[in-house]
Image (cartoon, rainbow, N blue to C red):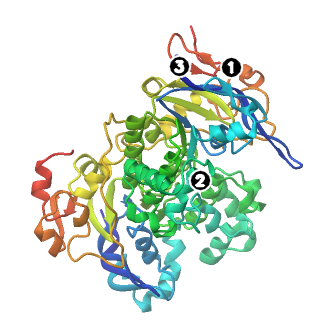
Amino acid sequence: MANLLLEVKNLRKYFEVKGRGTLHAVDDISFSIEKGETVGLVGESGCGKTTVGNLLVGLLQATSGEIQYSGRNILELDKRERKELCRKMQIVFQDPYSSLNPQKTIHDILSEPLLVQKIAKGAALEKKIQEVCSQTNLSLELLSKYPHELDGGKRQMVGITRALTLDPELIVCDEPVSALDVSIQAQIINLLMDLQRSMGLTYLFISHDLSVVKHISRRIIVMYLGRIMEVSETDEFFENPLHPYSKALLSAVPSILKGKNIERIILEGDVPSPIDPAPGCRFCNRCWMVLDKCRKEEPPLRRFRNLNHSVACHRVDFA
Amino acid sequence: MEDLLKIKDLFVEYRTMDGVSKAVNGVNLTIHRGESMGLVGETGAGKTTLALSVLGLLPKRAGHVVNGTIEYNDLDLLRKENWAALQKIRGEKIAMIFQNPLTSLNPVFTIGEQIAMVYIQHQNLSKKAAFQKAGEMLEIVGIPAYRIQDYPHQFSGGMRQRVGIAAALVCNPDLLIADEPTTALDVTIQAQVLELMRNLQDRYKMSLMMITHNLGIVAGMCETVAVMYSGKIIEYGTIENVFRNPAHPYTRGLINSLPDIKAKQGRLKPIEGMMPSPMHLPLGCEFAPRCPWSTEICLKQKPVMDNLGEKHQAACHNLATVNLKGLG
C-alpha cells in the first residue's frame, strides 16, 4: 500500500429522523483508495453509497470517524484548509439535469470553480477553460449555450469537464451513467477511462450497475444497509464472490450471455429500514444461509485467506 | 402458433405546437398466443407509443394513428365501431403494467379498492366477492392479504409493482404488455419481480410483450425480440438469432456498446451520434447518419425488412457486406 491516497476509518453518518429514531446511513466503514486506481462502490438504493461520496467531498458532515487524505484527517481541517482540499477532490453527480445551474451558460458553469478558488481570471481563465474542454473533447461552440439546450450525454460531459477544471487528483463519480441510454453510456465510460490514463486520476465510482463497475474498476466494495459486506479485486470478486448478498446480486444482473435456464438466487423480501437496525448481520433476514449466530453477532470484515479479498460473513470458511 | 395480435403498417404521430413528431413509422409485428416477445430500443424509439396505440391510450388531441391496423383476434382495434369492444378487451384480454408503479396507482384509494374495481368493472362481481378475490390475487403475487386496506405509499417499490401486476392479471388476460416494469427497481428486487412474471406467465399461459431498454432482461425472459429505432422495427427474430448473430448495424452497435457482466471486454464501442429527432426524420434509412456501413442508397431510400432465415429479419440495404465482417 505504498501509494495510499485516501483512507477511511470507522466512518459513521447518522441522521436523526423525528419521532422514529436514528437512521444509520453509513455505519462504521473503513476502506482505502490507492493513487491512480478506480474503486467501484456498489449496492442498492438506500445502502449509503451516495452518502459515502458526499462525506468524502464535504457535502455532508460525518458523525464520527476519520478520512485521511494524503496523510491528513480532513474532518479536522478548518474552513480555509477544507476549501483548498476541494481542488484535489471533485465530484460528478448522477443527474446531469439537476446538477447544472439552468440560469448559467456552460462557460459560466465551467469558470465558477476557478473563480471561487481564485485560481484564474480574465485571459488565463479562458485559456484554462479551452484546455479542459480539449481534454474532454467538449466542443467550444457549446460554451455559449445553456444546459437545457444540450442532451443528457453532453450535459454529463459538462459535469465531468467542470470536475476537471481544478486539476483534481480524486474524482467521486456518483452514478455518472445511470441516467443515460446505453450507447451514450459507453461514450462516457470510455471518456472517464481515457482521462484516467492521460491525467493519472483516481476514481471512486459509485454505481448500482455491476456490469459497468466490472468494466471500469480495479477493486470493488459492496455495501448493504450502511455496512461494507465485501471488498475485493474485481476479477477475483466476479470469479469467487464470497458473501451471500454478493452472490445474489451477481445472479440478479441480467445478461445477454446468461441465457434463460440458469440457476437463479432470488432473495426474499425487501431491504429493511436503516432506522435503528437490529443487532447481528444486516443481511440476516434475507439470507438463505442464516445461522442463529448471524442474528446476534455482527460479523466483522475479515481478510479471506491471503488474497486481497475481505468479507463480513459468519458462513465463510476463512481457513 | 396462432396469431393473437397483428400490428400492420402502423404510423403514429404526435401533433404539437412545435410541429409533428413521427413516433411510430410503419411497424409490422405479430404476437402469437403464448409467446413472450421483447421490444427493445433506446429512449424515444417509440416503444411506449406502440404499446399505448394497442390499448387505445394515446394522449387525446396530440396522439394520432395516421395509418395501419391493429388486429386482436381479427378485430381491428383502431376502427371506431370497435371502440366499445376495445373497452371490454382493455384490462380483460389485454392488460398493461407500467414503468412507475407509484404514478400508475391512484394514491387516494387503497390497493384493495383498485384491484377490486377491476373485478366489479369486468366480471360484475359484488363488492364483497370482489374484495375477497382481490385478497386472493394479492397472495398470488406474494403480498399478504391483510395488507388489502393499505394505500400505495405504504408499500416499497417492488411491492407496488406486484400490486400493478395483480391488477393486470385479474381477468386472466391473453396478452400482458409490460412497459419497463422493473426499470425503477433495484437489481435484487428486479430479479424477484421478473421471477414472479415468469411463474405467472407459465401458470396463466398468456402472451407477454416486454418493453425494455435492457437487452439482458429480454434474453432471460423472452423467446423473440424486436429491436426498435426511430419508430421502426429494424430487426426481429428469436433471441438466439438476434443476440448471437445480430444482422443490423444498430443491433450490433447496441450489443458492442454494452458492458456485460459475463463478458471479457476491452474498450467499449459506442455508437457515434444520436437518434434523429422524430420531428426531422432523414429521407433514407434512419440509422444511416450514424452507420459505419452506410452507402449512397442508404441516404436516399428506406430499407425494408429482409428475411435472413427462419424467424430472423432485418431492415438494412447492406446486410450482405455488414455480415461478412463478423461481430466486431
Q: Neighbour class for label 1 at 10 Å: few (<14), some, many (≥20)?
A: some
- Can you identify the residue that label 3 sits on? A309
Pointer 3 and pointer 1: residues touching (CB < 8 Å)?
A: no
Label 3 and label 1: CA atoms lie apart by 13 Å
Tag 2 subunit:
A
Q: Which sits earlier in the primary sequence, circle 2 or circle 1? A: 2
Give the residue type that dot 1 points to: Pro
Q: Residue furthest top?
A: A319
Secondary structure of the residue carrying numbered label 2: helix
Query: Residue A233, percent across and down?
Result: 48, 24
* Tags 3 and 1 on a common chain: yes
Q: Residue at image x 47%, y 41%?
A: A253
Tag 3 subunit:
A
- Can you identify the residue that label 1 sits on? A300
Q: Which sits earlier in the primary sequence, circle 2 or circle 3? A: 2
Q: Is residue B116 left or right of residue A142?
A: right
Query: Residue A49, percent across and down?
Result: 62, 40
Q: Is residue B155 left or right of residue B257?
A: right
Would you identify the image quadrant in which residue B67 lies? bottom left
Secondary structure of the residue carrying numbered label 1: loop
- Can you identify the residue that label 2 sits on? A115
- Give above or below for A90 relative to B222: above
Q: Residue at image x 60%, y 42%?
A: A44
Secondary structure of the residue carrying numbered label 3: strand
Query: Residue A269, percent across and down?
Result: 66, 42
Q: Residue at image x 37%, y 63%?
A: B33
Label 2 and label 3: CA atoms lie apart by 43 Å
Label 2 and label 1: CA atoms lie apart by 45 Å
